[in-house]
Image (cartoon, coloured by chain):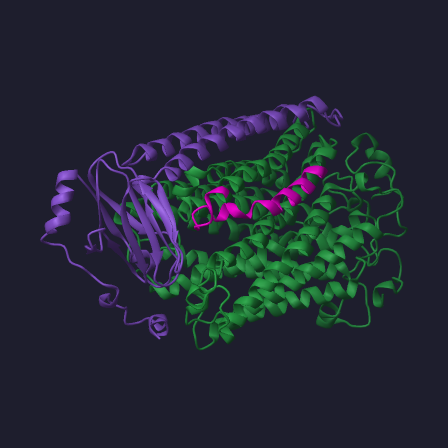
Amino acid sequence: MSDSTVNTNGDYVNFYQYKGKHSGILGWLLSVDHKRIGLLYLGSMVLFFLVGMTLGFFMRLEMWNPGQDVMGPQTYNALFTLHGIIMIFLVIIPGIPAGFGNFFLPIQIGAEDVSFPRLNLLSWYLYTIGGLLAVASLFLSGGPIDTGWTFYAPYSLRTGTEVIMPLMAAFILGFSSILTGVNFVTTVHRLRAPGMTFFKMPLFIWALYSTAWIQIIGTPIIGITILLVIVERLFGVGLFDPAMGGDPILFQHLFWIYSHPAVYIMILPAMGVVSEIIPTFSRKTIFGYGAIAVSSIAIAFVGTLVWGHHMFTSGMSDESRWVYSFLTFIVALPSGVKIFNWVATMYKGSIKAETPFLYVMAFIFLFSIGGLTGLVLGSLATDVHLHDTYFVVAHFHYVMFGGTIFIFFAALHYWFPKMFGKMYNTKIANIALAIMVVGFNMLYFTFFILGYLGMPRRYYDYLPEFQGMHQFATVGSWVLIAGILLMFTNLFLGLKNGKKAGNNPWGGMTLEWTVPSPPPLLNFKKIPTVKYGPYEYEHYDEVTKNVN
Amino acid sequence: MFETASDYAQNVDFVMLLIVGISVVLLLGITIAMIYFVIRYSRKRNPVAKQIHGHVLLEIIWIVIPTIIVMIMFWYGYEGYQRLRADSEGAYEVKVFSFMWGWNFEYPNGKKTDTLYIPLSQKTKLVMTSRDVLHSLYIPAFRLKEDLIAGKSTFIVLEPSKTGSFDIACAEYCGLNHSRMYTKLHVLEDSEFDKWLKIGMPDEEIKDETETDTPQDSVKAEVLAK
């Protein structure tokens, strides 16, 4: 390790004040400190999230009337494609692991950094290059990609828009994801503090660890699939296009073999954050630590076997349809176990419902709706009706937005004082959350009804009978965006002029709350020795006695 | 629920109600328990938490009971759908072709239309294939859809329970005019259907793929034309 092993000029020089080989902007761009890299990721993601949100805003605007409002069909098709690519590949997949994982994984296991700090920086560069390529593809002569984020063949092989460059972007982002996965798995195996056995790790670490394995195992498949599409487009090799003897259903299998497990890459880290926040604000040990830890592994494993439920109407065999339906119902169980354990953790706790905890409550409500409507979609008869309708759009927004993104926001509010040493205005933060929950449900719950009534997704135009509901949903999108902007503004003001936060403002017990806010370069004065489980609040005083 | 045109569609609505019904009970249970705990065990009322590490029996209960529940859901979703698809013998067969952006329906006697007509009292099997990219024939009133793929044949079985006209949409994204592939399904009394099949409807036009308007502003349409 290079500059990260250089001694600090005293114990409480935090990682912002620390002067390494480089200073200024280079001090960030060339830093191998996991905390700086984590913040680089978080900054990039918030930026891309705002871009994706803006695209969504214009899509909803276009849905105000049937026919043309503010754009033509080609633009609309490009918008929903880019909204999907940006939100999935640039925000949700890397979101919690690369951002908060980078910052907190080493601290939570009592390490000075990740195992491969330089590889870690390379991951961020790959991420940035991927993001820039995706954006640059908008300005090429063919026009922005219009295939949908699923790139289904043969349409993706035949469209005249720019497909290769955004595919390359996704390919490079995949490498970023794999490298982060390798780094985290090694770090968890090799750098745990003395005394921290696997079953004494915080549940956030368990979630990151499970996620890292899916990233390592699953991502190469999408990488290869993307390369095959590029080869077919460039050289006319008939792999997926039936006109050249290819099989378009093969593409769907290859795509979903990765992209369904990717759904768990997206949600597992969020579940890990929830398992941190609930004990902290309940001052209570987590209910069923083992069950929650093992259910992460179970989700990661069974989750690799259920991709076919995206393909019930694809023309695959009837036998595959019921087998995948069956397996899909099985994968619902470990998620249910987690929710029951979280609620049980609150029982006889000593709960202070501060902002991060309120976010978690919103998450449990919204994610339960997302999960339960997943049962509707796992069932054959109902899925055949609802597949590729607004019902599916509603379902995955409840899971991905109500789930992962709400917890991304929760994590921002939970770890904000640790990352920046300052506190935001909690009252405004709570108001912003309330506005978001109202807007969210106006927007996406309406989609459930639209879908059941037969409104297909990715539709530029629609039948007049759906107009009332489309307009209601569009108004909901404005409320939601107002809430999001208020939230970010409040955090930004907190960053600028927030009050100084203590080292442990919430009364947490995991190791990040035992170090100063913001943490020093190498995190710990002395690597701690771990005696107790991460949430054993009966030992709270002993564990936190040296915290100011 | 909205309009249904077959017994199968009513069965789908039943499965939907069953799953949604159970889900609402679970959602309310979880949400009410959560809110109750947050109020009842607030730090003011309960300054010291009781440390409970887990409860094996409870863990078993909330694995076993949901397992039974989801198996029931699986069964109802599976049973009706497989029955409908497994039994299409002696069905009236209509060939379906999809293209960017429209449909052709071809009847056993060689008649071609761009809206679909089927008889009421007989099963109809749509044997479908695409002429270009993926499409999906979606009939909301029958709660059925299936993709159309070039070079491969897929099918849908229709068993109508009433006459009338119903929407057909494309549900697999297929480019510029994906949202404008709407056409109609007409379910006719058998005698009327036979009459229609023989003499045709006066206002019926036979539209072929080659006659379909291609939008002027589509770069893609030109590429595809090559």
> Residue B36: percent from the left, percent from the top?
58, 25
Residue A273 falls in which quadrant of the image? top right
- Residue at 43%, 41% in the rendered image: A383
- Residue at 84%, 32% in the rendered image: A539
- Residue at 46%, 46% in the rendered image: A312
Question: Is residue B222 part of the magenta span, yes or no?
Answer: no
> Residue B73: percent from the left, percent from the top?
49, 31
A409 horizontally vs A53: left or right = right
Q: Is residue A499 visible?
A: no
> Residue A267: percent from the left, percent from the top?
61, 46
A244 horizontally vs B29: left or right = left
**A66 lies above or below A414:** below
**A339 lies above or below A78:** above
Q: Chain A appears what colour?
A: green
Question: Is residue A300 part of the magenta span, yes or no?
Answer: yes
Quarter in which the N terminus of chain B is drawn: top left
Task: Indicate the chain coloured purple by its letter.
Answer: B
Q: Nearer the viewer, residue A137 or B47?
A: A137
Q: Quick one: which residue is furthest to the bottom in this view?
A: A141
**Which range is magenta?**
A293-319
> Residue A56: percent from the left, percent from the top?
45, 56
Q: Is residue A498 visible?
A: yes
**B72 lies above or below A172:** above
